[in-house]
Image (cartoon, grey):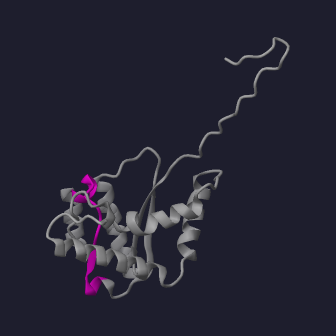
Amino acid sequence: MQWGRLSSPPPKKAKVTQSSGKVMLSCFWDCDGIIMTDYMEKGKTVTGEYYSGLLKRLRSELASRRRGKLRSGVLLLHDNTPAHRARQTVETAERCGFEILPHPPYSPDLAPSDFCLFPNLKKSIKGRRFEDIMDAITAVEAWFQAQSDTFYSQRHLKVKDRCEKCVTQLGDYVDK
């Protein structure tokens, strides 16, 4: 309610426009850049089965985009979500020849994408409005492509340094 005269017009109300929605991105990258992205359909959940499928796709992408990488060994660093720790996921990673690096609990600063990649991406698209999900995906892919040659290698070194600090501390690593 607002105070006003009987003859005054009613107050204007702001119209809320509906968001075009959210989409979940799974991103696999190394020091040379993005290897593979996957945008999950709305309403789906990442399960061990779904993530295992991503690992199989990652293996074929590595074979085509990063020749020789599979022979030299692939180290996979991801966080401790249930889908990443599921038996099916671990077995698929072993069959693909990936070595899963241990990720200490409660260490979000060691999740490479959350720590190094997504904050920069979020800054670049902050405040932009997209008509639909495909516009948002196009903007994200364009941002990935626009990064300099050294962008991914610098982020890769940051994650490596943080992991080494965590291992040498022999316990929980807390960055001050």
Q: Is residue 138 visible?
A: no
Q: Quadrant of residue 176?
A: bottom left
**Residue lying at the far left of the rendered structure:** 170
Magenta run includes residue 79: yes
Against 137, residue 157 (above or below) is below
Residue at x 47% of width, y 63% of height: 119
Against 109, residue 33 (above or below) is below
Q: Is residue 3 left or right of residue 160?
A: right
In the rendered image, residue 35, in percent from the top left (x then y), is placed at 42, 75
Residue at x 46% of width, y 51% of height: 41
Q: Quadrant of residue 153?
A: bottom left
Question: Which corner quadrant holds the N terminus?
Answer: top right
> Number of labelled discs?
0
Which is nearer the eye, 63 or 3?
3
In the rendered image, residue 163, in percent from the top left (x then y), is placed at 26, 73
Magenta run includes residue 77: yes
Q: Is residue 165 left or right of residue 59?
A: left
In the rendered image, residue 101, in percent from the top left (x then y), is placed at 22, 71
Magenta part of the protein: which range?
Answer: 70-85
Which is nearer the eye, 163 or 94?
163
In the rendered image, residue 92, in percent from the top left (x then y), is placed at 23, 66
Q: Is residue 96 left or right of residue 14?
A: left
Q: Is residue 108 visible?
A: yes
**Residue lying at the far right of the rendered structure:** 7
Q: Is residue 61 left or right of residue 7?
A: left
Residue at x 58% of width, y 76% of height: 146
Q: Quadrant of residue 58?
A: bottom left
Which is nearer the eye, 54 or 168?
168
Residue at x 75% of width, y 28% of height: 12
